[in-house]
Image: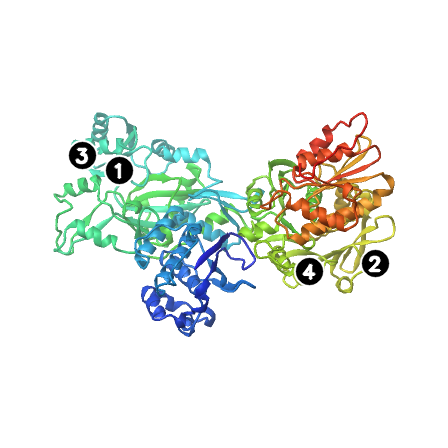
Amino acid sequence: MRVLERSVYRGPHLYSVRPMVRIQIDLGELESWPSDRLPCFAEQLTELLPGLANHGCSYREPGGFLRRLHDGTWLGHIIEHVALELQTLAGSAVTRGKTRSVKDRPGVYNILYEYRDEATALAAGAFAIRLIAALLPEGLDTIAGLRMLDAPAIEDVRDVPAMIAALEALLRKTALGPTTRALVEAARARGIPVLRLDDFSLVQLGYGSRQRRLRASITGATAHIAVEIAADKSLTKRLLSEAGLPVPRGTVVRTADAAAEEAARFGYPIVVKPLDGNHGRGVSSDLHSEDAVRSAFDRAAAHSRRVIVEQQVAGNDHRILVVGGKVVAVAERVPARVIGDGLHRIEQLIADVNADPRRGVGHENVLTRIVPDAAMEALLAKSGRTLKSVPMAGEEVVLRETANLSTGGTAVDRTDAIHPDTVAIAEQVAAVVGLDVCGIDFLTSDIARPIAETGGGIVEVNAAPGFRMHLEPSSGTPRDVAGPVIDALFPRPSRSRIPIFAITGTNGKSTTVRMVSRILCEHGLTTGMSTTSGIYIDGRLTQEADASGPKSARAILRHPKVDAAILETARGGILREGLGFDRCDVGAVLNVTPDHLGIKGINTLEDLADVKSVVVESVARRGHSILNADDPMCERIARRARGTPVWFSMFGDTLMPARLRDHVQAGGMAVVRETGSYGGTIVLHRDGERIAVMPAAEIPATIGGIAEFNIENALAAAAMTLAHGVPVETVRRALAGFTSSFEESPGRLNIDDSNGFRVIVDYAHNPASLTALGQVIGKMRERFGRVIGMVSIPGDRRDADIAEMGRLAGAIFDEIVFREAPDGRGRQEGEVTSLMSDAALGSGLAPERIRRIVDEHRAAEACLRMAAPGDLVVLMPTAVERVWRLVLDFEPAAEAAEPKAAAHA
């Protein structure tokens, strides 16, 4: 077996809308060895992983996968199920997967399986392959390429418990804690998108300007000053006391002597605790002597320079949770304890309690393991015990002075029992401190009776209360405490999402993105825009890069000022990791023409259409799919498009396609170009009504209507924004101001006339875009002398595509400079220019009219030096900004001379 590729899909992708790992594997000789031909294989595998019996597989019932295993299935399919089972055993339950053979590549499979944690999923895939290989006959058990899955090393590849332990360790590194996880799940249940901002608990809920952030139970609405107040226990107590709320008498001290003196003044029993501690660390209670107070001061001082000494309030420990000013849950907390059996030591009883699968390290599980330490030994010493003492049968031994879950305590739900007077007190506490999410530690002997009868009071206020005790109490009713937090952050019917406009296609994406952005800016929105030129926020370039992938999309959706996201969505990013969003409001496929074929398994136009269709398959139910009625592949895509279909077409009158005519007559929406005046008129059809939007020639980027590809881009942009509800007048006004200047649309039909000849800079990089540009040049030709072109195509394209680029160039230009760098992409230097040159010669262009210069900058400069007054120079660069700067800085010689160029300079 050889691992060929791996991908981690984080958004909707070619195979599913679910996050999945894809491992492409070549079975080699094992293609001839399905599971029913492998002696004892199924028996050994199910003995190691008995949980596979629960997998339904294609039978959709328990035992289904085992039937496939015994009847005979291929190893790729088995790896899929083992990877799912290993993740589930490690605590990351997943069930969905699929394995598909790769077309025209016998023995090669794409294995896909669901995941929750990326690192864990990749390691599970590697372990699955290793485990299966270990069960194969000698000579068939060789594996190659596993390094790309980055799995931990284990000694015995059949040691499933060791695999599970390694996966659990990976999961712990990145797993969200119970509080954050509950909030994330509550948000997703409401359809609110979630983005993780770090490897810990900082999470963004919602997109763009509608986002809210949280870290555990600290939210973006939590006032910093309220957190500061809660952290200062002395200040909190004073403010609550002044508000007439029940708090114990106490003070802050800095020395053991002062602690002893204040304890004597207040009267015993006494509590000593750090001023700004948490999780019960350094807290000592039920102190009855000066020596005990002094020892307790030392323990507290290890956590804080200032220490609180206060009266001990009698009663049981309760945590009251207030969210948005209302009590949502109450739990009685019970300190960590063990029950004696008359046989075992306390340390063994603790180990037995820790064996409960609900207990884990820190906050990872519902309960926390009990960990012996000096504080526990000190508490045991008060009753004359040590960890080696053997309690009598039925004897209860308390191990902690505080009831925090983080030190091994348990919780009993008391939400339905709390007295209304205590509810009112708790809600006042949260208001006085100013916390939106507030945990109140409240002592009372009976939470069901008013405090006036039982005594008790408030002993602490917490700004980041944990939810574990309420979500899964040790006994009592679990409470949904995360839902109220989400409702407070996003009061119904407020929205958590900003409009997302996703645009894909072979050509025209960047210009259409910019047109849509211009229209939405005119509509009053702050836009975030991703293109091959970079990321733009409110029209300002914030990151220069090829930003047409999912990483850039997520960067825009994270930006807190963005009201609408317009995302260029390229083929490469979809294949690499899927979309950068879960769904979009408007998705558009502009066209599908031959480009990037033969790369990443995309070999035919139909394959490419399937990739592009991912965008419109991810449109929201109430959204719109915008499709090109003039493109045959869009009809194929339409079958899978979601939302309401909206078509655009350059043929809006007598030549209107029959399919489009039927759509319009049925009241469907379409934006078309009707011929008539030069460039024609852009017309909207909606609900049976015809609305003239504007003459196409009034859009400056169409150069008076001759740049038909920009008319087509304008049709798509108009369709997208009109479908979203932007008024026709706004669309008209925005497009009337949209130019093809470098500032507005870099590398897209940029024109400079400053040197006595015209220069066009355009990023035409495939045959379809060169054909469209050639039509513009043809309409301009009569106004100019020679037409000089710098032409190239990326080296990872097929030989036929490279040759076609040369053939087209030979038909369009009078003089050609073919160049390569920086687009060689793995080919030998000179190979791309040679293929293009041969094709140009074959089209009839004379050899002396063809030059080959590898370097882009030198090739562009050669074209400019060749130009005479009245000529037209067309530069098709990769480094658009650098070449545009060259054009602006160019100074022609006194007499334009034609330089000699070497075949390979």
Q: Earlier in the sequence, mark 4 or mark 1?
A: 1
- Is 398 left, or right, of 228 in this rendering? left
Earlier in the chain: of badge 3 and badge 2, it is 3
Disc 3 versus disc 2: nearer the observer: 2
Is the residue marked by circle 3 packed among few (<14), some (14-19), or many (20+) residues within 10 Å?
A: some
**Is 894 in front, or is 766?**
894
Residue density around tag 2, few if under 14, some if 14–19, many if 20 or more, within 10 Å:
some
The amino acid type, in three-letter code, at marker 4 is Met
- What amino acid type should be assigned to the residue bearing mark 1? Val
The circle on residue 653 is: 2
- Residue bearing mark 1: 283
Quarter placement of the C terminus: top right
Q: Position of residue 336 (x, y in %)?
A: 24, 48
| Badge number at residue 633 | 4
Q: Nearer the viewer, mark 2 or mark 4?
A: 4
Label 1 – label 3 distance at C-alpha: 12 Å
Q: Secondary structure at mark 2?
A: loop
Element class at badge 3: helix
